[in-house]
Image (cartoon, rainbow, N blue to C red):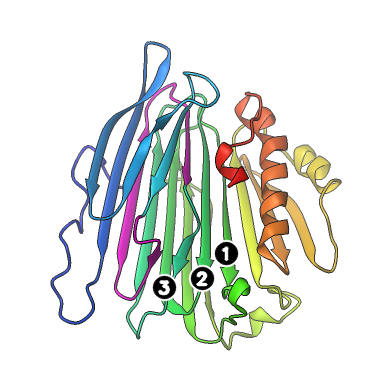
Amino acid sequence: MMDISQPPRNSSPSTSPGRDECRADLALRLARREGRTVLVERRERGPLAVQKALYQESPEICQVVIIHPPGGIAGGDKVSIGIEVEKNGYALVTTSAATKWYKAAGRSSRQEIIIRLAKVQRLIGCRRRISFSTLPCQSVFKLEVAPTASAIGWDMALLGRQAFGEKWNQGSIHSSTQVLRPDRTPLWIEQASLDEIDPLLESPQGMAGYKALGTLWAIGHGCTSSLSTKLNSHLPFEPTLRAGATALPNGVLLLRCLAAEIEPLRQLMIDCWMRLRPLILGIASHRLRLWAT
């Protein structure tokens, strides 16, 4: 796990010839101070930054908006984000817009997000949104969560830029997700690899021809099989949008979604996040202002 009290690794700008390759690192630490969750440490290298700490809901909940000024990841780029939330902290981490992955000219790109929730009693809403174009890319997500912590987050992906009529017909995607206890006990580990000719893209056991996919994950004592059953009763299973929820036996709830277009998927994620947040985090839901943009 990344120790964000130290400067992130890979923080030196690239000096390789040809197109300028971008390396960006961001390390954040949030802590409880006098009834508020505050951003006590921030280390930035390259084009990756935090706008400011916001308190849209209450002083207890620190909302952090991460911005990536280049607007996308291209061939050879490396982006790394490390976040640590200390005891009794409550953070909501999001991005200002979707991350776009561009053509890579044969060079792989990588995005890594590592979150550590050690000894936190009431935790985090974390949102990631990714839009893929054509490239070989690697996406890594690691979450270390203490037994007293709880968390909700989601990840969405779109294969090809639908607004431009672009099809995803070149490149590859490799993703890795790990959710662990501080002692390294695994709660959920998943790896996926797709390319433009993978049979899973059209297979009924895979993406069944859908171009938008998403996973919402929740971790905490409230993530039970009875909750997944209740959630499933509200989920759609239609020609353009389908979803299903599963509870793992170790306090992890997963919601899987496939859609023909990204916007209905996004709205479903928001609705489920709003429904689950009071049950998992023990605090009322509020719609983010960013969702209106």
Circle 2 crowding by C-alpha within 10 Å: few under 14, some 14–19, many from 20: many
Give the structural element (helix, strand or loop) at label 3.
strand
Q: Which residue is mark 2?
A: 132
Is residue 35 shown above or below 148?
above
Are the residues at dot 2 and dot 1 in contact (C-beta closer than 8 Å)?
yes
Q: Which residue is mark 1?
A: 157
- For the point 66% across and 30% down, the residue is 285
Q: Which residue is mark 3?
A: 137
Q: Is 53 colored magenta in this rendering?
A: no
- First in sequence: mark 1 vs mark 3: 3
* Label 3 – label 2 distance at C-alpha: 9 Å
* Label 2 – label 1 distance at C-alpha: 7 Å
Question: Residue 73, which numbered label?
Answer: none
- For the point 27% across and 52% down, the residue is 25
**Image quadrant assignment for residue 88:** top left
- Where residue 87 sits in the image (x, y, percent)? 40, 23
Residue 191 visible in the shown view? no
